[in-house]
Amino acid sequence: MKKNGQPRTSPITLLPKCPTGIQGLDEITGGGLPRGRPTLICGGAGCGKTLFGAEFLVRGAVQFDEPGVLMAFEETEKELTANVASLGFDLAGLVRRKMIVVDYVHIEPGDTQQSGDYDLEGLFVRLGHAIDSIGAKRVVLDTLEVLFASLPNEAILRSELRRLFRWLKEKGVTAVITAERGRESLTRHGLEEYVSDCVILLDHRVNDQIATRHLRVVKYRGALHGTNEFPFLIGEEGLSVLPITSLALNHKVSNERIATGIPRLDAMLGGRGFFRGSSILLSGTAGTGKTIISSNFAQAAGRRGERTLFFSFEESPNQIIRNMHSIGLRLEPLVKKGLLRFHSQRPSLYGLEMHLATMFKEIAAFKPQVVIVDPITSLMDLGTVSEGKGMVTRLIDYLKAGQVTTLFTSLTQGGHALQQSEAGMSSLMDAWLLLQDFEGNGERNRVLYVLKARGMKHSNQIREFLISDHGIDVVDAYIGASGVLTGSARVAQSDLEKAAMLASQQEAAMLEREVERKRKALERQISDLRSDYEGEALELRRIAEQVGTRTLLLGTERAASGLLRQADIKVGPVARDKPRTGKRN
Amino acid sequence: MKAKKKPAAARTLKKLPAKRPVGKYVLRLYVAGATERSRQAVQRVRELCQTELAGHCQLAVIDIYQQPKLARANQIVATPTLVIEFPKPVRRFIGNLSNTTGLFLKLEVPTKGKIAL
């Protein structure tokens, strides 16, 4: 036989497990129900006990090739077949293929009389025969407690039930026993006394008019298990438990960045937008432009040829399309091209779990690259804070596993509680943009800033943005004495700055001209001096030439006269001096 | 069986019309193996058939160990179970039939005859 559910990693805690095939349950229990032992499923009316049992058998037969016996005390085979058919289980077909035996046990209390001592051997024989006829590995007894109502003498019944559970263990079948929940104990007739290996409690309760089903593993002898209460659903494909804790933090990450559709917002995010597959929170008070920024994001995704799934819990698709059209965002072509799909629902339509399941289904069907939830807060209001947080966690984990970028908008109340109220959610988010209203000077202006953006350099500035007829326009930041300036104050500041700029530009030009003037004056002086010098030099050279000529003449004359006087001739030096003098001149 | 139900006037134990029912009693006793309990039940039913219902009784003792399918077909849960299949309505008695008074009352045996048909 297959042992699909066995934990293969830890050989010490090798308690064989029997996978239920029920989505999520095997994760909580670490592989399924204890194999070869009875498990008690208890819960109130209408909490899904019978369905649990039926699904355990059907999935066992279909997915794990383990035949099963369903011993029904409350519903006939026909009723059961019809009931589970609505969940897509073909019980009749499995019965025909000898994968499942349904034995309807009917005891009419009215026409049965006790006379003396009895035992439940009839039940044992029927069960034993059914098990042996198809080689069953799984047994469901739904609901044994009917016996208490229809058979007399509780003492006999109790001892017989004790024997039954022992017998089931000896048979080695994995049994599921359902029981009605009691007022103070887990079951009305204290069956938990006999079934001590695994007890699962199902619960269906209404909070603020919204019903949520919960499942809790009360006890699981010899195995680690999730002890929390897990919400579960009965959907079109049977039960699904959506465990919060089962998803590990090990999803792939992408270094790819995707644009927001608002270039200057991208610039604030290190110039390139958000990381693909990140979760982004866009929070702000009413009317700060959350839906518009979301739509921008959707449009940018559409331009890249990516699909966007837009969950809207406040507006209908047509309303969003119309409203965005008024600011120049054309979403309709994207819808037509199949790049954008809206899913609009009132939050109060279902409970949190059903919403989550619907979202999962939509996401699985549309396979978007971008998901927008507008606003997440209206969903979170459906449950308690922790339920809401759990839901967002699961949604984010699911989307991250598929590298889907998610934009959550969050409608916050005004005032300072703004950040506090979302502290719980923010830890789940990779990036957080805050939109705010600034009131002052008789006007209300919108600003945005990046509160956090994991893994990227981001602007620390508070930036004003305008909603114009061509979308979002993030404008320059102007910082005044009292902080960031917005609206007309920003315009005034901008004008002031412009005037100052003009003035300084003029001054600079003036200085420039002065320098030029001085330079020119200097140059003039220099050229005057040079021409003076040149004139003088010419004159001097002329004089020098004259002097040289005279000296030569003098020398010649002296030599001549010296010859005449027979004098010591000092012609040499004079002669030597000659060219030097000439050169100097 | 074209069993026509007579009004319940004949219920009193004092007036005993000396008529036997037209059909025979059909009794089936389901037991599980040869236990003490089974033995006691079989013995009681046999006594009943031989005394009160002598000649008007068709008894079958079925061991569900041997014929488990019959247990399912006849909705046997507890053993021993005595099923009175005729006359209608079908009545069931579970246990080793140690308390025969109740049994006979139910069977309307002391009427010595006048059993609704």
Image (cartoon, coloured by chain):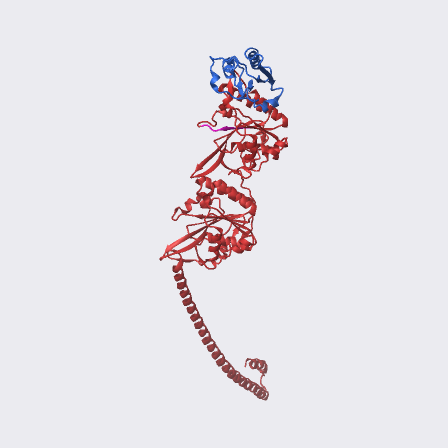
Chain colours: A red, B blue
Residue A3 visible in rendering: no
The quadrant of the picture occupied by the N terminus of chain A is top right
Nearer to us in this view, B42 or A567: B42
Residue B115 x %, y %: 52, 17
Nearer to us in this view, A65 or A440: A65
Q: Main secondary structure of the magenta part?
A: strand
Residue B51 x %, y %: 55, 10
Residue A362 x %, y %: 54, 45
Looking at the picture, does residue A88 appear above or below residue A430?
A: above
Nearer to us in this view, A496 or A250: A250
Q: Splitting the image into 4 quarters, where does residue A17 fall? A: top right
The quadrant of the picture occupied by the C terminus of chain A is bottom right
Q: Is residue A39 left or right of residue A413?
A: right
Q: Is residue A63 magenta?
A: no
Q: Is residue A238 left or right of residue A97?
A: left
Residue A100 visible in rendering: yes
Number of marks drawn = 0
Residue A249 x %, y %: 53, 41
Look at 49% across and 40% down and name the residue there: A353
Q: Farthest left residue?
A: A442
Q: Which contiguous range is marked in magenta?
A: A176-182
